[in-house]
Image: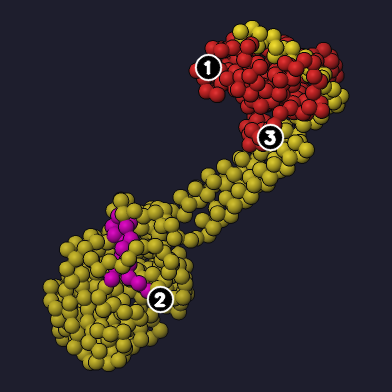
Amino acid sequence: MTGRLSEELKQAGDLAPVFTVAPDTYQRARRARRRDLGLAVVSSVAAVALIAGIVTSAAAREDAGPLPADGQGPVGVPSVVYGIPSDADLGPASSDLAVGRSAVSQLTDDEEPVVIDDRGGYHLLDLPGFSRPLHMLSLSPDGRQLAWGWSESASSAKGTPFGVRIADLDSGEVREVAIETGTSPYVYDFTWSPDGRWLVWEGIGAGRIAPGQVVSEPVPRPGDDNILYAVDDSGVVSIATLKALRVWDGELLSNEVRETGWYPSISTVADGVLVETIQRDRDDTFTTRHRRLVDGEVVEAIATLDDRSFVSDLGWVDARQALVLTVDTPASGVGHLDVLDLSDPEDTTSYRVGEVRGQGVTVAADLVAADRPGIERPAQAWVVDEDSSSSAAMLAIGGAGGLVVVAGLGWWMRRRRA
Amino acid sequence: MRDEDDFAAFVAARSPALSRTAYLLTGDVHHAEDLLQTALFKAAKAWHRIEGDPEPYVRRILYTQNISWWRRRRLRETALGGYDEAQSLPDTELRLAMIDALGRLTARQRTVLVLRYVEDLTEVEAAAQLGITAGSVKSISRQARARLRTLAPELAEFVGAEAEGGSA
């Protein structure tokens, strides 16, 4: 049967006319081949550019340091403390403060409190009574306690009940310290003793909080705008101003009048040593004065901090190494974490730990060591910096090139069909 | 220049046979002419790479291009009522009915019928040409013949009754 089908089909095919093939078919085909070759070359170049853009983009993000911190990284202080924009997605603020040992505390652009745990995880916190700009927060040197100011309302009126709360970041338990001063409810600075057991707060007044206590003992508050407090592991408080250096422990132990024109940048106590880093005439040269409290011996040394002009102390890495924040100008948005090595009083050296772009930053100094400076963390998705912007631009250019090629290809195909 | 001469010689020699195949593949004079022009244009582009007899290469383009066009024009082609009577050249009533019925098949079905019953390829060879399995060739062939019988009962005599179990 199918033999007949074959026969009939072949005979039906005989009905077909012989079509005339255009005489220029070969020439047109050759031209088309040349165009195809050209398009292939252009497409390849565009593809390479696109891939290069993507690769460079990825590399740039890696160079920018730090990509998404997921709380699973190595223990340490991040090498870059980013500013946290208002639209950063950190999830809802948590009132559970058992976030574990932390490396950094800071404020978002909306002045919401955040801690970065010691493995890089971000935690937006709901701190009871915390209100900006009345209050500040501060991480203890070991990263296991967080202190902040609180008040019953956001009012700055005198008589508003206020105080200090200290959270144990391991258990989440909060110790509340009420302050009886009758002043406005400001608590805008903290200084921890190197072992993290003593705490001095400063506002309109100032006070010392002993280990485990829920009361604050008033500390002298000289009427000077440039005042810095320090407390050592035995609770002895040093108070440095432009005019004097006082030492207090329930009563005034000493009161030394200082030379005018010297600006205290660091005044802190560690292992019985009081260190003052003083800037003279703002010429980028720092005279570092080491004073042993036990015998009053004074040694002076010069430290040049990479031409940075302003320094503030963040704590002690060990008995002879101070962790400081250096900034170009007080208004500068970017600072650096530097460690001043004061081991040799004749030659103070420094090394760089990381970069600070956020505001209200305090650091757990115990997590810093010479062999463990800043830890590279993956950057959060909300981090915007020049590197990522430029890599995005490269990506955009590569993508635009690809689109042009695709559009060109489509045009040629339509033309060929026509 | 030699390639161009070779191409011209091939076209002159094989156009009648290729026209016939294109006509059976499409069931339509206009589509057949377009199909042949396209196949020869593609072959010319690759002419320098063709070794040996170029006809199998050109035929393969005819088969695959026809199916490719059908895929793109599936809806329109499904609605086709029949061949272009003004362009067809009636010989016998039976052959006209055959052409008419072929025009109502899908390109896939027509192509399989042409490969199997005009080009006399085996199921395996036809499958290789179309890049499908031999089983698919068999199945499509059965469907095509069943549809031919439905469309043109007068063809049942030589279309064969062995495909009765196939889908119509």
Query: Left or right of A163: which side holds A325?
Result: right
Quarter of the picture containing the N terminus of chain A is: top right
Task: Please give the residue where the numbered disc 1 appears in the rendered image.
Answer: B164
Q: Amino acid at mark 3?
A: Ala
Is A114 included in the stretch rendered in magenta?
A: yes
The picture quadrant where one finds residue A112 is: bottom left
Q: Which chain is red?
A: B
Task: Please give the residue where the numbered disc 3 appears in the rendered image.
Answer: A40
Position of residue A306 measured from the top left corner of the image (x, y, whole percent):
45, 64
Secondary element under disc 2, as helix, strand or loop, is: strand
Q: Which mark, residue A279?
A: 2
Magenta span of residues: A111-126
Vertical order, A21 against B122 (above or below): below
Q: Amino acid at mark 1?
A: Glu
- Chain for mark 1? B
Position of residue B16 measured from the top left corner of the image (x, y, whole percent):
80, 15
Kindly identify the residue that appears in the image at 24 percent across and 84 percent down: A152
Kindly identify the residue that appears in the image at 77 percent across and 15 percent down: B92
Kindly identify the residue that appears in the image at 61 percent across and 9 percent down: A2
Asked if labels 1 and 3 touch by Cβ distance under 8 angstroms, the answer is no
- Chain for mark 2? A
Looking at the image, is mark 3 or mark 1 nearer the viewer? 1
Vertical order, A257 against A295 (above or below): below
Task: Have a look at marks 3 and 2 and say if they share a chain.
Answer: yes
Q: Which chain is yellow?
A: A
Secondary element under disc 3, as helix, strand or loop, is: helix
Query: Left or right of B68: which side holds B39?
Result: right
